[in-house]
Amino acid sequence: MCGIIGYTGKGDAKEIMLDALELLEYRGYDSAGIALLKDGRTQMIKRAGRVKDLRNLCARINPEGQCGIGHTRWATHGGVCDENAHPHRFGSVTLIHNGIIENYRELIDKYELEGSLISETDSEVVAAVLQHFYQGDPYSAIRRTVLKLKGTFALAIMFDDQPDQIFAVRNVSPIVVAATADGAILSSDVAAIVPFTTDYFVMPELHVVCLKPDKIEMYDLSGDHAKIDWLKVDWDVSRSGKGGYPFYMEKEIMEQPQVIGETILPRVKEGMPDFSEEGIPDPVFADCKRICVIACGTAMHAGLVGKSLIQWVIGIHVDVVMASEFMYNDPVVDKDTLVIAISQSGETIDTLEALKFARKCGSPSISIVNVKGASIARASEYVIYTNAGPEIAVASTKAYTTQLAVLYLITARMALARGIWDEQKAKAFMEELLRVPGVIERVLETKEEIHRLAGCIINARDVFMIGRGLDYSILLEGSLKLKEVSYIHSEAYASGELKHGTIALITEDTPVIAMVTQEKLKSKELSNIREVQSRGARVVLLMKEGETLNEGEQWSCVYRLPVMEDPFMVMPASVVLQLIAYYVSLDKGLDVDKPRNLAKVVTVE
Ligand code: M6R
């Protein structure tokens, strides 16, 4: 987690870093700090709080320099306080760190550091070990230190006597590097690089990069020169920024018709699903005997929808496994199991590790990733990018619906590759999929009506969401969204499970959001709704336009969803749930984009 930035060049390093840290703040926002190296002296300014607090502090101190490193922290080792904020300094070494050093305790003992450290962090220990090995040769010190570290790290390092130079090394945690018009820059992700250039490279693991104002050099750990593989950011840079909305979350919700279209359209050739651009041959879809989806959070919820679709159309077994639990249940994957890893950031460490394990077991793999060139994309055999563009709000919205779009495409291609569907059947499915952007547009036009619905739950302490089948899968995501941005406790329940205990919690003060979009489940679902109504619950009902409700029934609130074929109803329904969560958070006056305790990219286990 944590955002990191480094710059050396002719510009004002402080301003460049503060601007970059604001862009990176979604990675963590417990504390922030910068260090500037000038004339052999390093000046550090850091504090608990947001980047705006750091900016105010910098305005008072006014540090100068053209070479510096900066950090925005999501606390792991050590509480949220000024001392634990990065950068950390030991002797002539100053560094910032993203990741976790697992053996930091052993290193403290081995290098007798007890009593000489200022913070409680594992990162300061790394600075101390570097200092221990440093005798004027940064490469040698970094190499020797890295060999002692266990865990994950992205480190940007300055040495007082190496003017204008920043060194970087990483294991698992990402670092991207680029040349600017007047210098060189590194960061934990491309968001901070996009204002300067669209050309960048992802540092390979266990290599050392040296940034100088006019040069970027890279070496492997044996000291040999390494070749740099340059990439291009191919998202529309104008999409960065809030585009006039008060929060990124609203902007990203509103972008969905466009980005879903941009995810689907390049993969439709003559009305058929097509992954030839991705180079995925049909046998990958045709030969697998089962599928295992690995993902976390929202991405895992997308996987649940994928499971329903694939089991329905293809009739093969699909497991959806929380990547964070994958390794603890003796995973059974083999060459006949197609592994699908889903991740917006492409950096979630649990998903990455599970994917690597599956590949070692011989499983073919496809990843569905949003960020180009991310670790998960590189670790899988094939990658399908969601073209959602940068997603900045911590709560995922457009990444989720574009992941769903890719899962519909995979289902259709798989049905064709296995001879389950003929062209006509696939075409009809694709026509419905192509309607999705327009249908979502219609939902977005009703956002004020959804805003009023949000009013039905804003004062609740607990909210339940009930549905069956696909409705239940979407509600799991709707409930996560509500919890994450509004801090209202919420549970999604499979309606049939309610009677097995949870209905005891339903009272007159418990709003229940009920979803009924699947014709075959409608009558059972309506009975379950009546059961909670009889216990006094206020029901907010989401159902299709044109559906009839029984006369005389009392509904607190109803929202009518534009009609699609049943398997596609998840799309408009998800957007309604996203907007409900957004408006509750907005009206509660919360920081919608940066909910407490969270970070956008989860690079620690
Ligand atoms: O980057 P990823 O898609 O791998 O992230 C997985 C989860 O951390 C993420 O979906 C998280 O649940 C979101 N904050 C939910 O809105």
Image: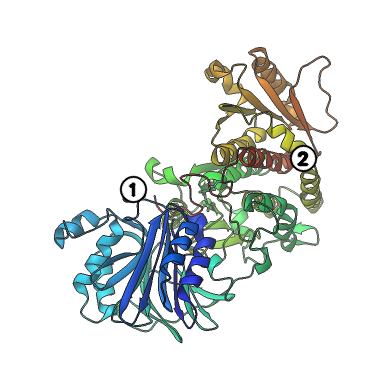
Identify the residue shown where x is 48% and y is 83%: 10
Q: Amino acid at mark 1?
A: Gly
* Residue at 72% in and 51% down: 254
Residue at the outermost right position: 546
Residue 426: % across, % down: 77, 51
- Position of residue 325 relative to residue 243, above or below, is above
Q: Position of residue 579 (x, y in %)?
A: 68, 42
Q: Residues within 10 Å of mark 1 (few under 14, many from 20)?
A: some
Nearest the eye: 341 or 374: 374
Name above or below for residue 61 compared with residue 151: below
- The answer to whether the residue labelled 1 contacts the one labelled 2, judged by CB atoms less than 8 Å apart, is no
Q: Which mark is residue 79?
A: 1
Q: In front: 413, or 108?
A: 108
Q: Quadrant of residue 154?
A: bottom left
Q: Quick check: is the Cβ at mark 2 less than 8 Å away from ligand 1?
A: no
Callout 2 environment at 10 Å: few (<14), some (14 to 19), or many (20+)? few
Disc 2 element: helix
Residue lying furthest front: 60
Q: Which quadrant does the N terminus fall into?
A: bottom left
Left or right: residue 591 versus residue 443 is left
Q: Is residue 12 left or right of residue 152?
A: right
Q: Visible in this render: residue 182? A: yes
Where does label 2 land, which residue?
448
What's the coloring here? rainbow
Residue 470's quadrant in the figure?
top right
Q: CA distance from mark 1 to mark 2?
A: 41 Å
- Looking at the rendered structure, the kind of residue marked 2 is Glu
**Residue 290 appearing in the image:** no
* Residue 198 x/y as whole percent: 59, 75
